[in-house]
Image (spheres, rainbow, N blue to C red):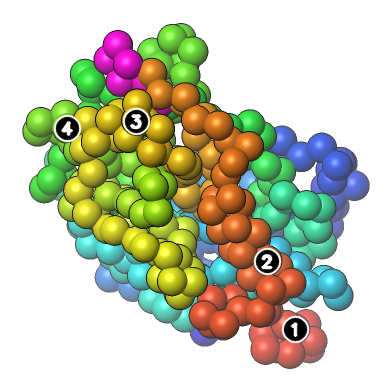
Amino acid sequence: MDIKVIQTQNSKIDQLDFNNIPFGKVFTDHMLVADYINGEWTNVVIKPFENVSLHPGNAALHYGQSIFEGMKANRTPDGNPILFRADKHLERINASARRMCMPEVPEELFMEGLKKLVYVDREWIPSLEGCSLYIRPFMFATDEFLGVKASDTYKFMILLLPVGRYYTAPVKLKAEDKYVRAVQGGVGEAKTSGNYAASLKPALDAKKQGYDQVMWLDGKEFKYIQEVGTMNIFFVIGDKIITPETDGAILKGITRDSIITILKDKGYNLEIRPVTIQEIVAAGESGELKEVFGTGTAAVVSNVCEISYMDKTIKLDTSKSGISEMLYDTIDGIKKLTIEDKYGWVEVVTAEELDLVAQ
Ligand SMILES: *Cc1c(COP(=O)(O)O)cnc(C)c1O
């Protein structure tokens, strides 16, 4: 695929304080844009970061056809980008696309576009502990038409953001007994914008009550634990590690998948099955609940120090979080190639591979 690169004439990189990077606010110099018109992807270009102009009747704004991914890159000591499980993110954006009646992103467009873009902006990849380059591929409808139907045209874009740590402290969760995130048959498995819009009110209410995040329960019985805000969830009870089985309403996290692979490989006693909130509360009260942690690209592995459910509160001693620490260190090490990548998860992007030397 021939992806044109238009280099910026005025880089903003000097304005970034790499020792103090806020999450989600700083964008790199370039972005990738592609248009889906007449049934094919065209106008693929990497160009200086700029606003996009939209018709006020834009279909995504009114009817919500919008999907995204979140992934991360680090750098080798000599500055080449290292991608983590990019193939899985491509698979998932296309699963989201199918659910939302949107066109799939071809592998060449996603992979070559992604690699070229991170290479062009490689100076933006932070190397400090806990920092990385956050990658946001996304797609939205662009038809200029008010009426409920799948759009005929779309934009696919990739943005890059240098980021610091997502959560700096262990999180307090509220098991939500009034609102739901997703139900079976809905769009909970798709990484679509509306899922987050629906979560804002419950998250705000939980914050007002002193919690950091909502822990979602199933939408039928308010009994089975689904996930947390932007993370999947794991519980260590006695010598077992338990995580909810994905049931069509839970987002299939790629970090979750990596953690399952690592735990199985290291011989841990792992159970992937429905988990009730009652079981967790009981394990907390009996002292058998040793660790609880959330997993996701943004936070990697994040310890939970408290779970509240109705009138009960379970507190966890996060100074004894051996398993979550081991998992964080393993994933973080593989992502930076300071630990051997025996699962074949990472890929180093080089100029030779991209044919960028000539440009
Ligand atoms: C993206 C996301 C996750 C985590 O997925 P990763 O692939 O591990 O980043 C978990 N839950 C929700 C709702 C998400 O949107």
Circles 3 and 2 in contact, beta carbons < 8 Å? no
The residue type indicated by label 2 comes to Gly
Of circles 1 and 4, the one toward us is 4
The residue type indicated by label 1 comes to Ala
Q: What element carries label 3?
A: helix
Q: Mark 4 points at which residue?
A: 223
Disc number at residue 351? Answer: 1
Viewer-proximal residue among 260 and 236: 236
Residue 61 in the magenta stretch? The answer is no
**Mark found first going from the N terminus, 1 or 4:** 4
Q: Residue visible at 23% across and 62% down? A: 98
Q: Mark 2 points at which residue?
A: 333
Disc 3 crowd rating (10 Å Cα; few below 14, some 14-19, many 20+) is few
Marks 1 and 4, Cα distance to the nearest angstrom?
Answer: 51 Å
Q: Is the magenta stretch mostly helix, strand or loop?
A: strand
Q: Mark 3 points at which residue?
A: 286
Q: Is residue 344 something one can see in this rendering?
A: yes
Q: Residue visible at 35% across and 26% down? A: 285
Q: Is residue 167 something one can see in this rendering?
A: no
Task: Tell me residue 201's x, y (percent).
Answer: 35, 19
Of circles 2 and 1, the one toward us is 2
Task: Decide if residue 126 is on the left or right side of residue 347.
Answer: right
**Mark found first going from the N terminus, 4 or 2:** 4
Q: Is mark 4 on a helix, strand or loop?
A: loop
Disc 2 crowd rating (10 Å Cα; few below 14, some 14-19, many 20+) is some
Task: Decide if residue 265 is on the left or right side of residue 140.
Answer: right
Circles 4 and 2 in contact, beta carbons < 8 Å? no
Viewer-proximal residue among 249 and 156: 249
